[in-house]
Image: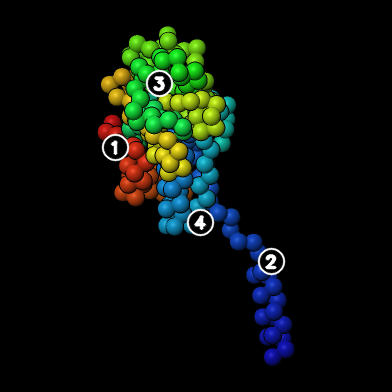
Amino acid sequence: MRLLAGRFVFAACLMLSVPLAAAETVAVAAASNLQLALREIVTQFSKHEPQIDVQLSFGSSGKLSTQIRQGAPFDLFLSADLSFAQALADEGLALGPVTPYGAGRLALWSATLDASQLTLRDLADARYTRIAIANPRHAPYGQRAQEALQAQGVWDAVKDKLVFGENISQTAQFVRSGNAQVGLISLSLALDPALRAMGGYALVPGELHQALTQGRVLLRRAEGRAAVARFVAFLDGEQAAAVLQESGYAAAARR
């Protein structure tokens, strides 16, 4: 009996000394406009797949794609438009084609004004001295903001008033902090309860700019990774689609 007891204690100690298997990780690079929606999607996914740790990195689509080219260890890239994801696929850095996952919208938003009563033409007024948009050089929402301002004929009148965010989240922060009176941000951020409570927003007519069809692409690092495949399958499911819809994204036609 003493021998059996000793063996039992030894076995128990051995089991305690063996570390639990590390959680599988999925590294996702995502456009900043997705912060609220994607975090909620990951929360729901974790209820189904608690052993998979989805790690999110947000930024402008242009800067994230540059990081991927430089070897950043991401499995999946969710761009704010199709072009940045397609460029990676064209360069052989991706697995398979680009998949559209939603269509974004631009919104005129202010933390202190009722922006629901404003139009883009109003921004030419001398009362508005600081207007925030994302940097058009590497942020699709910034590119579309410039297109919309040009289409309304006010770009020359407002270009010297512009404050450029590195991404759409920083753009919203400029407005929220008072560093800009009004900004052109994503509808998904304008619908954030914290931002919505501070001011109003107005949708920018979609015909004023190119479509904001957002696309994702699997990266080479994801090859053979079952955890990545399970997360992508969840992104394609009804729960994720419902979150995106509630966050202001329209469904995008699959190519």
Determine which residue is flagged by label 4: 51
Q: Which mark is residue 36?
A: none
Specify whether 165 is left or right of 208: right
Q: Amino acid at mark 3?
A: Ala
Near-viewer residue (209 or 24): 209
Q: Does residue 96 appear anywhere in the picture? A: no
Label 1 vs label 4, nearer the camera: 1
Near-viewer residue (191 or 177): 177
Residue 246 percent across, percent down from the top left: 34, 44
User: Are dots 2 and 3 in contact, CB under 8 Å?
Assistant: no
Q: Distance of mark 1 from mark 4, alpha carbons?
A: 29 Å
User: Are dots 3 and 4 in contact, CB under 8 Å?
Assistant: no
Determine which residue is flagged by label 1: 251
Corner quadrant of residue 109:
top left
Image point (67%, 80%), residue name: 8
Image point (69%, 66%), residue name: 17
Q: Distance of mark 2 from mark 1, alpha carbons?
A: 50 Å
Label 2 vs label 1, nearer the camera: 1
Specify whether 89 is left or right of 213: right
The quadrant of the rendering that contains the C terminus is: top left
Q: Distance of mark 3 from mark 4, alpha carbons?
A: 40 Å
Q: Amino acid at mark 2?
A: Ser
Q: Amino acid at mark 4?
A: Gln
